[in-house]
Every structure is written in C-alpha cells, then in structure tokens.
Amino acid sequence: MDFEFKKNTLDGSYRVVFSSGHEAIGHWLIEEIGTDVDKLDAIVQQLGAQKNINQEWRQLGKDWTLSIEQNEIHISANHLLNMDSDEEEEFDDSLSAYDEESVSWCGIEDFEQVLQSWRAFVS
C-alpha cells in the first residue's frame, strides 16, 4: 500500500493520496481523524488491544466506519452500511469504481504504519 501526505501551504489544509484499492483509508483519515492526535492515539491504543484479544471491534464515525475483523482493518463509507437489499440490486455496475473508493481492507501492521506516519506529519 502506497500513500503520500500533502499540506496546502496557502490554507494549511491536509490531503492524502493512497494507492488504488486503499482510497477509503485516506478519506477516513482526513474526514474522521484530521489533525486530532487524541483521536489518533485512541485508535492506535485500540489496535494494540485488539491484537491481544482478537475480537471484532467497530467505530462508527460521521461518514466512515472503521472495523477490526480477524486482524484486518476494514474501512467503509457509512452510506454502504445503510443500503438495503433492493438498493444493492439496483446499484449500477457503472458506479463500481466509486464503490471501490468507498471500501478498503489492509493489515493491522500496515494500518499502524499509516497512523504513525500521519501523526508525525501533522505534528
């Protein structure tokens, strides 16, 4: 998984770019965490706890949900969680590229590396 962090020198805003298939991680990072290092530290602490107990854990955010399932990280857009079966059937294949940007999976170690890098970047 490749990623790059950027800061706009004019307005101080942050942006992240992730490799294909991992875009949702970047969206989650900007929209749910931003520069809040307390939130970031709480997630890192939860990741450490999950390694030891190997249980599922979920954090529902405003727009994105972070889940830990079987030592993997799953990030998905909340609008996907709210789809009922009729809507899923109507979901057009032409939107599949958009859908791919709404869901990401990665290993816990890779995710921890992203979070540590983000923390160093915004601090």
Image (cartoon, rainbow, N blue to C red):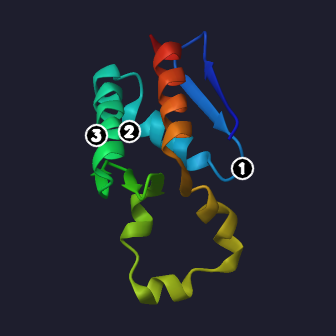
Can residue 118 be seen in the rendering of this structure? yes
Tag 3 residue: 49
Question: In the image, what residue type sits under mark 2?
Answer: Glu
**Quadrant in which the N terminus is drawn:** top right
Q: Nearer the viewer, residue 22 or 80?
A: 22
**Image location (x, y in percent) of residue 28:** 46, 42
- Give the residue displayed 38% in from the left and 82% down from the top: 84
Which numbered mark, 2 or 1, is in the foreground of this view?
1
Circle 2 packing at 10 Å, graded few (<14), some (14-19), many (20+), is some
Quadrant where the C terminus is found in the figure:
top left
What residue lies at 71% left-to-right and 43% top-to-bottom?
Answer: 19
Q: Secondary structure at mark 2?
A: helix
Q: Position of residue 47 (x, y in %)?
A: 36, 39
Q: Is residue 29 left or right of residue 97?
A: left
Label 3, residues with CA under 10 Å away: few <14, some 14-19, many ≥20: few
Marking on residue 32: 2
Q: Residue at x 38, y 38 (%)?
A: 32
The answer to whether the residues at label 2 and label 1 have Cβ atoms under 8 Å apart is no
Using the rendered image of the protein, determine whether residue 12 is visible from the camera's viewpoint. Answer: no
Task: Please name whichever residue, 80 or 22, is drawn nearer the observer in this view of the structure.
Answer: 22
Q: Residue under label 1, please give it.
A: 20
